[in-house]
């Protein structure tokens, strides 16, 4: 032992050279991170609007916008803080103590002080402190924290064990090779830090706001030029320009998207899906490809006896009894536990044994000694070629190959007198398919999501499982990771990160399932990172969706919910853009053409609240999810909205000219215009909520109630003369009927327009 290990002086020198065995932590100023949430294009729009409301003296509106701004900032900060939890969980796992041989003696030191070259000892129950190469001893290593695979692996000789693995059996000594961020575990932490996908939802909101602000800027410029040429007083035109800006900027758009996804996340939580990043709901609607783990997601992640092949005149009961006597509960070896459970379930008679030798990777078998009628016998199980050679058996190879081709792990069993054991047959163990997996896959495929299976198994096993599940496409091995395949076999957990990036470079919206620490970078990189029910804390912290129930059913639920949210948000966005165009064009063109304010600033603000009251109810509207991934195309959206808005602009100018023809004074005419804008807003909601004809589905109860309430409230305000000049109910009723007729006419134009939008979505 004197030649092993380092001196304390050399260890300290290497500690200075390599740094501590820990993941570096970047200190972040929490307050600066929070304030940063107010420094972005979308918050800028809210902040500008807030200032405008204060300039206009609208304190109530300013407070509401301020609260929305604060809500968006707090929500974004919280979600980012959760993502940082992945790194924190990684760091906590390295706060352990190690046994190290320094200066000729064993001592215990913090694992963070280990350096390459240290000689350490690990034993049952220990967390491996750093990557190390074993030099003596034999251990059963649980790598589930890294890979998510529940099956422990045998390690001995000159094999490598990785930090964060857990020793389940045995003890061994070895030399540390790499530490900290350079270790297998540390590199995962660095990938988690660097990983991340763009928020398509934030890009969408920003793009819509940008288009509307550009339009508004042109209109305000036109009004100011008009005021300058007509020598209109600045005191008159400036409040009008500001109120036009308030009416045009969709201040509630970011908050509405946030609230819609937040409401959807509450519903998903009741169905076993926890949403840690709200934008993931919208991403789930657009998800085109799902890369799914096999083990524990499509399969049960537990061994099961799937076939027995007795040899000669051996019975199933005898085969299982001899396999069971060569197994032991105390080892907690999954194979032993599976065989013992199967033998007991079939009431096989297991003889009492005198001695047991656990599985040894060197001999590739376990063995038990017992007596039969006073004569010494032994039973063995292990690798078929080893057991067959000891029993001098032949002709078993074809049966073993057939079982292995089904994705099974094949064991040979022999028993008999100590000097002449007899080959009894073969046992096949496999991880069975989850009962709900085929149905969940069909549901996802029906939604137009391509499911790709990712597994560490060999190609033969992957082909068998894929065939059982009905997955189509090429079966590729690790060397073909960048190819377009339906199944990727022989994949290491760290390969998933590069697979996600490769698919994203093809402009796909990618979902990835995972459960181990090494899955965390891929989960964070994917637009929809999904931590399955058995996932480690690190994987859950990196994911945007966390399943609390086994299997993939929750993913199909998330896709369906996301598609419904998309339809509601599409209705809201179409309605908002149409109304923004209509109101802005009516106000500006009305002033320029008729040289008068067609509606008062107070009525414009009242109109904003009347419209928002309705659009809020869209969050619970009855919608049908689309059967293909939903993709936003802002150009097609703006174009379609502009065409519909022009039709509504023609309508409102028709209302204005009708009022003038009936001899309305300026004040009642403004009330008449206000009612026309409110009613056309209600008609537009019913118009755009259905992609087909508006009678294709009944609106939600809340939406219908809100529409009726809105009509009653504004009609009564006009009847009594609150905030506006009086208007008889008879005139209001005629205007409502005329709006309904115009809406039905416009519905004939809308259908081909939205078909064009749908085709544009499919191409994007």
Image: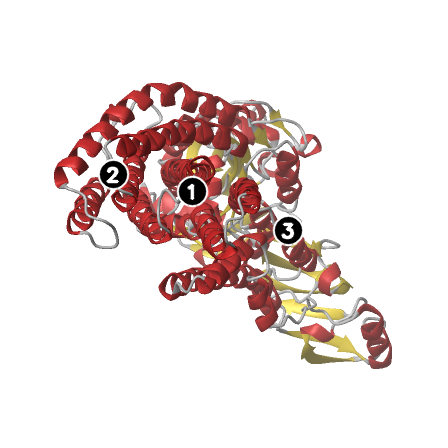
Q: Is residue 634 left or right of residue 257?
A: right
Viewer-side residue, 743 vs 153: 743
> What residue is pinned by disc 2?
664
Q: Is residue 370 visible?
A: no
Between disc 1 and disc 3, whose residue precedes? 3
Q: Is residue 700 left or right of residue 619?
A: left
Viewer-side residue, 287 vs 473: 287
Q: Is residue 332 visible?
A: yes
| Residue visible at 76% across and 64% down in the picture | 176
In space, the residues marked 3 and 2 are separated at their CA atoms by 64 Å
Between disc 3 and disc 2, whose residue precedes? 3
Instruction: Indicate the colouring scheme.
Output: secondary structure
- Which residue sits furthest front? 231
Q: Which mark is residue 195?
A: 3
Viewer-side residue, 148 vs 510: 510
Q: Nearer the viewer, mark 3 or mark 2?
A: 2
Badge 3 marks a residue whose secondary structure is: loop
Q: Residues within 10 Å of mark 3 (few under 14, many from 20)?
A: some
Q: Is residue 659 left or right of residue 27?
A: left
């Amino acid at each position: 032992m004197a030649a092993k290990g380092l001196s304390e002086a050399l260890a300290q020198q290497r500690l200075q050279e390599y740094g501590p065995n820990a993941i570096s932590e970047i200190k972040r100023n929490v307050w600066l991170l929070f304030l940063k949430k107010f420094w972005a294009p979308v918050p800028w729009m809210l902040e500008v609007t807030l200032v405008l409301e204060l300039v206009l003296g609208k304190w109530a509106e300013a407070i509401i916008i301020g609260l929305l701004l604060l809500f968006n900032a707090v929500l974004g900060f919280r979600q980012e803080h959760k993502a940082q939890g992945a790194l924190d969980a990684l760091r906590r796992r390295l706060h352990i103590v190690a046994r190290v041989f320094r200066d000729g003696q064993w001592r215990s030191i913090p694992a963070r002080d280990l350096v390459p070259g240290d000689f350490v000892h690990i034993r049952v129950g220990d967390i491996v402190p750093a990557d190390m190469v074993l030099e003596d001893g034999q251990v059963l290593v649980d790598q589930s924290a890294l890979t998510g695979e529940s099956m422990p692996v045998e390690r001995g000789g000159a094999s490598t064990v990785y930090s964060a693995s857990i020793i389940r059996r045995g003890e061994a000594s070895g030399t540390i090779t790499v530490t900290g961020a350079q270790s297998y575990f540390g590199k995962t932490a660095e990938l988690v830090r660097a990983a991340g996908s763009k928020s398509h939802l934030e890009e969408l909101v920003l793009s819509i706001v940008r288009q509307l602000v550009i339009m508004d800027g042109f209109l305000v410029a036109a009004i100011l030029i008009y005021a300058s040429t007509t020598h209109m007083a600045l005191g008159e035109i400036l409040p009008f320009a500001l109120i036009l800006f308030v009416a045009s900027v969709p201040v509630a758009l970011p908050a509405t998207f946030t609230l819609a996804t937040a409401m959807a996340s509450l519903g998903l939580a009741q169905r076993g899906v926890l949403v840690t990043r709200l934008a993931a709901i919208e991403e789930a609607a657009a998800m085109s490809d799902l890369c799914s783990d096999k083990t524990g997601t499509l399969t049960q992640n537990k061994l099961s006896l799937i076939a027995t092949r007795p040899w000669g005149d051996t019975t199933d009961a005898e085969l299982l009894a001899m396999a069971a006597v060569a197994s032991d509960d105390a080892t907690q070896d999954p194979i032993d536990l599976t065989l013992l459970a199967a033998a007991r379930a079939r009431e096989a008679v297991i003889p009492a044994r005198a001695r047991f030798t656990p599985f040894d990777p060197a001999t590739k078998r376990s063995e038990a000694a017992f007596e039969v009628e006073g004569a010494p016998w032994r039973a063995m199980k292990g690798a078929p070629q080893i057991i067959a050679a000891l029993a001098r058996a032949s002709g078993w190879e074809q049966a073993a190959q057939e079982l292995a081709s089904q994705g099974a792990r094949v064991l040979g069993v022999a028993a008999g007198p100590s000097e002449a054991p007899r080959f009894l047959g073969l046992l096949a163990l496999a991880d069975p398919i989850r009962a709900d997996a085929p149905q969940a896959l069909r549901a996802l495929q029906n939604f137009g999501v391509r499911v790709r299976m990712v597994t560490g198994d060999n190609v033969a096993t992957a082909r068998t499982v894929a065939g059982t599940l009905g997955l189509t496409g090429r079966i590729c091995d690790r060397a073909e990771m960048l190819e377009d395949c339906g199944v990727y076999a022989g994949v290491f957990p760290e390969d998933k990160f590069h697979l996600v990036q490769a698919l994203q470079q093809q402009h796909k919206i990618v979902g990835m399932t995972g459960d181990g620490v090494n899955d965390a970078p891929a989960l964070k990189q994917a637009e929809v990172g999904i931590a399955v029910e058995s996932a480690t804390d690190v994987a859950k912290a990196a994911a945007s969706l966390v399943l609390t129930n086994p299997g993939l059913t929750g993913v199909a639920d998330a896709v369906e919910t996301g598609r419904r949210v998309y339809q509601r948000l599409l209705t809201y966005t179409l309605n908002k853009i149409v109304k923004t165009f209509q109101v802005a064009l009516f106000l500006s063109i009305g002033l320029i053409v008729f040289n008068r304010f067609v509606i008062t600033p107070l009525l414009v603000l009242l109109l904003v609240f009347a419209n928002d009251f309705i659009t809020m109810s869209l969050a619970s509207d009855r919608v049908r999810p689309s059967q293909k991934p939903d993709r936003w195309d802002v150009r097609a959206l703006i174009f379609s909205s502009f065409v519909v808005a022009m039709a509504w602009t023609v309508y409102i100018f028709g209302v204005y000219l009708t009022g003038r023809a009936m001899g309305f004074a300026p004040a009642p005419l403004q009330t008449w215009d206000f009612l026309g804008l409110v009613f056309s807003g209600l008609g537009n909601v019913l118009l755009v909520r259905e992609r087909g004809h508006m009678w294709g589905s009944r609106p939600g109860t809340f939406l219908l109630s809100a529409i009726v309430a809105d009509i009653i409230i504004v009609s009564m305000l006009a009847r009594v003369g609150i905030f506006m000049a009086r208007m008889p109910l008879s005139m209001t009723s005629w205007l409502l009927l005329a709006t309904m007729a115009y809406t039905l006419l416009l519905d004939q134009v809308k259908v081909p327009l939205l078909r064009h939008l749908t085709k544009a979505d499919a191409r994007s």
